[in-house]
Amino acid sequence: MFDSLKKKLFSWIKPVEKETKKKSKKTEKPKKSSKKVTKKEPKKSKKTEKTQTKKLLESKIKKNAQDILEATLETEQLGEESEEIEAESQEKPNIKPEELNLAEKEIEITEEESSKKEPESKPNFFTKLINKISTSKLTQEQFDEIFMELELTLLENNVSLEAVDKIKESLSKKLVNMDIKKSEIENKIINSLKESILSLLIEPPNLIENIKKSSKPYIILFFGINGTGKTTSIAKIADLLQKNKISSVLAAADTFRAASIEQLQIHADTLKVPCISQKYGSDPASVAFDAIQYAKKNAIDVVLIDTAGRMYTKQNL
């Protein structure tokens, strides 16, 4: 800094010295003598001229020095500020853009996770019942209130209102105002619900017993849409009847579908049972009538009638 100041000062001092030298040379030149007699002015001494030039130089130097000092102070302040900024930038860790992206993604994920609160699990029919019974005896009002949820789910799943009422009635008899141990609460509720549902279901009929008790011939008609396995089911039941020593005759009343008569005839041949049939396009009712008459004449126990696979809205099903 001081070296630069010296250079600037010398650069300003040199031209001033040159000017003073020129002035001094001009003053030193002898004046021409004039004939007129004039009063001689007292000449200025060289010392006074030098002092004046020195004073001028000193004043100019002081002004220039003040300007230079002010400029240097400003530059020093700017330098200090720039050094502080550089120090702060050096203190900051060098983070790669990939790491910044990952950090931003992690922050977004955490914000999403915090915003997505886990849905509170609502207690279902069984948990409500268990909680009520474990604390005290279940009253009829409490049972009706809790059963409302199960009633809605059953009705939404196409369970008839009559069946729902019967389930409710059987459950209330087994649970309301009953002393049940805490360890047996869940099993008791599940078992009582099973029993109430099973009581509504129709027991499957015992085909063999019904045939033996009824008058002869016992007639079974198979109907439904195509592809449900009517013809195959006829062959299976005929085989079941043979094993129970019950005779049967097959009626090929499906006169609409191609190869339906041949299919039933093959089953009859393998089982060695008679099969009554007519031409395709004939009246199915006449085929069924002929098979029943044949069973009566030959003392056959069961008539199994096959029909065409069509919707119930179609004519001559």
Image (cartoon, grey):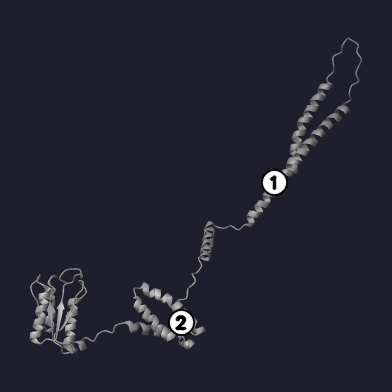
Q: Nearer the viewer, residue 199 or 249?
A: 199
Residue 238 place in picture, x, y as percent: 16, 83
- The quarter of the picture where residue 40 lies is top right
Relative to 36, is 280 above or below? Answer: below
Please give left or right for residue 282 compared with residue 103 in the image: left
Q: Label 1 amino acid?
A: Leu
Q: Nearer the viewer, residue 265 or 178?
A: 178
Residue 219 place in picture, x, y as percent: 16, 82
Q: Residue at x 43, y 75 (%)?
A: 149
Residue 262 place in picture, x, y as percent: 11, 75
- The quarter of the picture where residue 161 lies is bottom left
Relative to 188, is 39 above or below? Answer: above
Q: Label 2 amino acid?
A: Gln
Which is nearer the N-term, disc 1 or disc 2?
1
Residue 157 place in picture, x, y as percent: 35, 73
Indicate the quadrant containing the C terminus: top left, top right, bottom left or bottom right: bottom left
Find disc 1 in the rendering and name its residue: 78
Q: How many marks?
A: 2
What label does residue 137 carry, if any? none
Residue 305 can be seen in this image: yes
User: Residue most toward the front?
Assistant: 141
Q: Residue at x 10, y 87 (%)?
A: 299
Relative to 153, is 61 above or below? Answer: above
Q: Nearer the viewer, residue 1 or 93?
A: 93
Find disc 2 in the rendering and name its residue: 140
Instruction: Determine the secondary structure under disc 2.
Output: helix
- The quarter of the picture where residue 30 lies is top right
